[in-house]
Amino acid sequence: MIHKTVTQSQRGASPMKPVSLARLSVLLSASALIGGCAFAPGMRMITPGPASAQQGNSAETSTGASETESQVKIQDIDPALIRDLATRPPLRAETPATFDTTTSGYRLGPGDVLQITVWDHPEFAEAAGSQAGPAARPSDPPAGFVVDPNGGLQFPYVGQLHVAGLPPEQVQAALTKALGKMFRSPQVTVRVASFRARQVYIEGDVHGPGSLSVNDVPMTLYDAVSRAGGFLDSADQSRVVLVRDGAQHEFNLADNRTQTGSGGRIILKGGDLIHVPSREENGVYVMGEVVKPTTALPRRNGLLTLSDAISQAGSFNSATADTAQLYVVRGAQGATPEVYRLDARSPVAMVLANQFQLQPKDIVYVDGNGLVRFSRILNLLLPAINTGVGAAVLAK
């Protein structure tokens, strides 16, 4: 009887081995699951404290990661910070003192076509050539006397006359004096039939990009955009770039007040290049726990608030977002980036978000909550748990 009892216990002990193996696999996976909460996968913001800074100096100095974190100060977005940012000077300067806001009249240059009339002497009309027919190319100049590349003008009985850099009135006086040696009291009229010496080039988000001729009417930035057909809907009117002599200058043409100020008073000259950027060039990156990570575009006036960016991303993801950890990273490409944090759990905080102005290339990041990090760890460890349980079942 005793022998039989021992045999049954032995028989009962042998199937316990695979069951213990399964339990061991589950326990190991669970312990890994609990330990994995300390290093949750995915991107999340970590604010370095004094202890972490000391550990970083000893353990992570070789990589430089902790050194960079300790140098970046995270500032809370509050009314005081918004007032401080509003008083800072703008990143771009407008209206340098060297820009001309007045004009002394048009001066001739190579390529200009002059219409010269000597009254009571119709023979001079033949020297100007006949008007082009209807089949002529649009690029052909009209009938008249063309200023050559050297700035000279060839006129009958006068010969070569240097006219580049002179106003038409002065050329008229010079011809009258020269013809007065052969004709009695000649009456000469000089006008510009085609302005081709100086061109202004406009590109970007306008309806008609291309070249614009500078004529005797002074051309401002507003005039150039108007002659190019106006802005497209995608244009960033607050950052119009004027390239002159290799230097770039930005002007805000979205503010109506500048029509009597900077952009409305700058007189363009030949060789100027105007670039109207697209709003996509100055977008803000919204990522993290939002409904639709996207590149938020500024308005036509170039303004974009934090609330606008969150709205374009579809607002927070209510299931995964930690609205207390809303970050704005500014100057990420520079040596000293700035990080701002907003606790957006209260609807009142969105008033601050509506007052916080973003800048091009800012990064808006919404951190995830603890449940999201736990779920991500669980999704990583579940395959290992299923494998252990499956092995235990097969061994049984």
Image (cartoon, grey):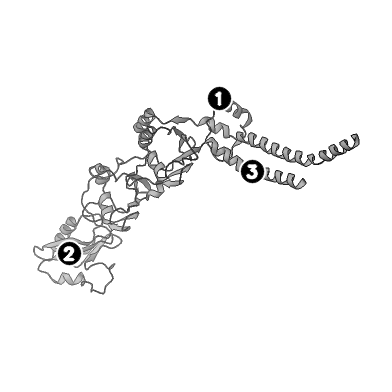
**Do labels 2 and 3 touch, CB within 8 Å?**
no
Q: Residue 145 at what x, y percent from top left?
A: 22, 65
Callout 1 secondary element: helix
**Do labels 1 and 3 touch, CB within 8 Å?**
no
Pair 2/3: label in front: 3
- At label 3, which amino acid type do we have? Leu
Q: In which quadrant is the C terminus drawn?
A: top right
Callout 3 secondary element: helix
Q: Residue 344 at what x, y percent from top left?
A: 42, 34
> Local crowd at mark 1 within 10 Å, few (<14), some, or many (≥20)?
few
Give me the C-alpha separation between circle 2 and circle 1. Answer: 84 Å
Pair 1/3: label in front: 3
Please give the residue where the numbered disc 2 appears in the rendered image.
Answer: 116
Q: In which quadrant is the N terminus drawn?
A: top right
Please give the residue where the numbered disc 3 appears in the rendered image.
Answer: 382
On residue 343, the disc is: none
Question: Residue at (64%, 34%) from the top-left corner?
Answer: 34
Callout 2 secondary element: strand
- At label 1, which amino acid type do we have? Pro
In this rendering, the answer to whether 302 lies above or below 210 is above
Please give the residue where the numbered disc 1 appears in the rendered image.
Answer: 50
